[in-house]
Amino acid sequence: MVTLQALPGNAGWILAAVQGLHRFYTRGDQKVVASWMTRQDRVEAIADNVAYSDRVIENIGNQFNELTPDVFVLGFSQGVAMAYRAALLGRHRVAGIIAIGGDVPPDVKAVPAERWPRVLVAAGATDHWYTPDTVAADESFLRNHGVAHNVFRYDAGHVITLAVLERVAAFITAR
């Protein structure tokens, strides 16, 4: 949530950070962390996660009396796959997908182009997880699938920088 609160110009926006549903303890310090899923029961976990995301969007709309809020789904790193899934497999149409440091998961590539919102891909030049080859493959897929998209490359690794936050804010306000 701290990262969302750092988005320039967010006054008047409703910000919500949804944590992965599957919590576990880290080794050593026993800190509670979360993940969206593991390899086990993956199909069922995806369905559960998408249904949960749908409920979050509905609850936010109900809480703020917004029947059709403009929703942008943002993911970072492993959360990018869930952002794509929530946006494309869920019940709600979203205004945009923001993918920072993570690739398009194979299970959404069959979703028809007309279901896709515009997409912002942000990729660090020295990111060792979301490599230039993977970024190029995603960009090729989005272009060939007819998806409106922008790719923002920034001078950093696998992190969210101020430049990324500024680009995200510009992407949202361009709506």
Image (cartoon, grey):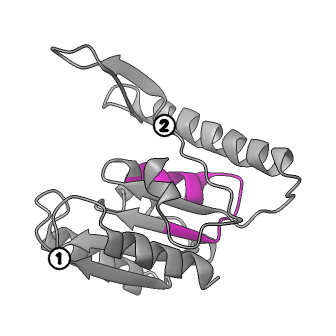
Residue 19's tag is 2
* Amino acid type of the residue that numbered disc 2 sits on in the rendered structure: Gln
Element at label 1: loop
Question: Which of 110 and 50 lies nearest the eye of the viewer?
Answer: 50
Element at label 2: loop
Q: Looking at the figure, which quarter contains the C terminus?
A: bottom right
Q: Give the range drawn in magenta.
A: 80-97
Residue 27's tag is none
Is residue 18 in the magenta section? no
Above or below: residue 143 compared with residue 91: below
174 lies left or right of 29: right
Residue 116 spot, x, y in % from top left:
57, 72
Residue at image point 16% right, 56% down: 129
Is residue 91 in the magenta section? yes
* Amino acid type of the residue that numbered disc 1 sits on in the rendered structure: Asp
Residue at image point 20% right, 68% down: 134
**Residue that carries the numbered disc 1 in the rendered image:** 155
Distance of mark 2 from mark 1, alpha carbons?
A: 27 Å
12 lies left or right of 1: right
Question: Which of 22 and 45 lies nearest the eye of the viewer?
Answer: 22
Question: Which of 17 and 38 lies nearest the eye of the viewer?
Answer: 17
Residue 138 spot, x, y in % from top left:
30, 73
Does any portion of residue 84 appear in the rendered image?
Answer: no
Residue 86 spot, x, y in % from top left:
56, 52
Residue 83 spot, x, y in % from top left:
48, 54
Question: Which of 41 and 65 lies nearest the eye of the viewer?
Answer: 65
